[in-house]
Image (cartoon, helix red, strand yellow):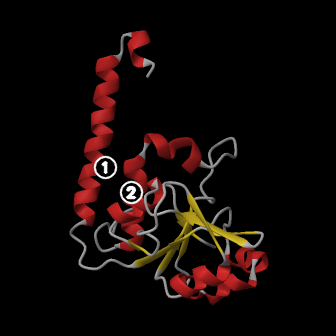
Amino acid sequence: FYAPFFGRENEANKTFTGIETAYQEARALAKKATRKPSALSGALYKDVWYLPAGDSWAAQFLEDAGANYLWKETPGTGSLSLSVEAVLERGRDAAIWVSPSQYTGYAEMAEGSRHYSQFRAFEEKKVYTFARTKGPTGGLLYYELAPAKPHEVLLDLIAIFHPELLPERELYFFKPLE
C-alpha cells in the first residue's frame, strides 16, 4: 500500500511475488502427503469453545497443509462458538490440536479446563501453540509477523501434520506444548 508513495513499487512487487511463490511451493509439497491427519483448533473461553469456521484463513492454512480440519465444511470466515460437548463429539479423536488459545503447557491447560484431557491430541501430547514464540518486547511473533510470512506458517503446519515431508524443519511460529 505504501510503496507507491515512496517509489518502491518494484521492490514491493518482488517481495510479494517471493512470498507468494514460497507459499505455493509449500502448498505443492503438502499435496505429496499420503494421509490427512485430523485437526482440532481453538479452546474454551468461559463455557464457549471458539474455533475457526470452515471458510476462515485459519481453516485454509490447515487445508493447504494437508490436514483434515474437522470443521472444514462449516460456513463462515470468522469463528464458530460451540459447546464443549459439540467439540468433544466431533473432535475427541483428532490426531493433532493447533492454536489452543494462549496456552503454552499441558499443566496450564489442565488447570484451565478438565475437559481438555478428554481429547486424544492432549493425551498423546500432540498439541501445538504459537503462544510460546515471543519477540524481544514480549509480543507473540505469530501476531506480529505471520501476516507477512504466511509461507512460514504453512511450513510449520506441514512439519506438524507431515513431519516426513520436512524432517529438518525447525518450527518458526508453532511449538509443542510443554
- Left or right: residue 16 compared with residue 95: left
Q: Which mark is residue 154?
A: 2
Which residue of the protein is positioned furthest toward the front in this rendering? 75
Q: Front-most of 105 and 54? A: 54
Q: Is residue 116 above or below residue 143?
A: below
Q: Front-most of 101 and 26? A: 101
Q: Is residue 116 above or below residue 103?
A: below
Q: Amino acid at mark 2?
A: Leu
Residue 151 image offset from top left, x and y in percent: 37, 50
Q: Secondary structure at mark 1?
A: helix
Q: Amino acid at mark 1?
A: Tyr
Q: Secondary structure at mark 2?
A: helix
Residue 163 image offset from top left, x and y in percent: 35, 73
Residue 46 image offset from top left, x and y in percent: 78, 69
- Are the two marked residues, 1 and 2, in contact with CB atoms closer than 8 angstroms? yes
Q: Which residue is mark 1?
A: 23
At label 2, counting other C-alpha atoms closer than 10 Å, the crowd grade (few under 14, some 14-19, many 20 or more) is many
- Left or right: residue 142 compared with residue 10: right
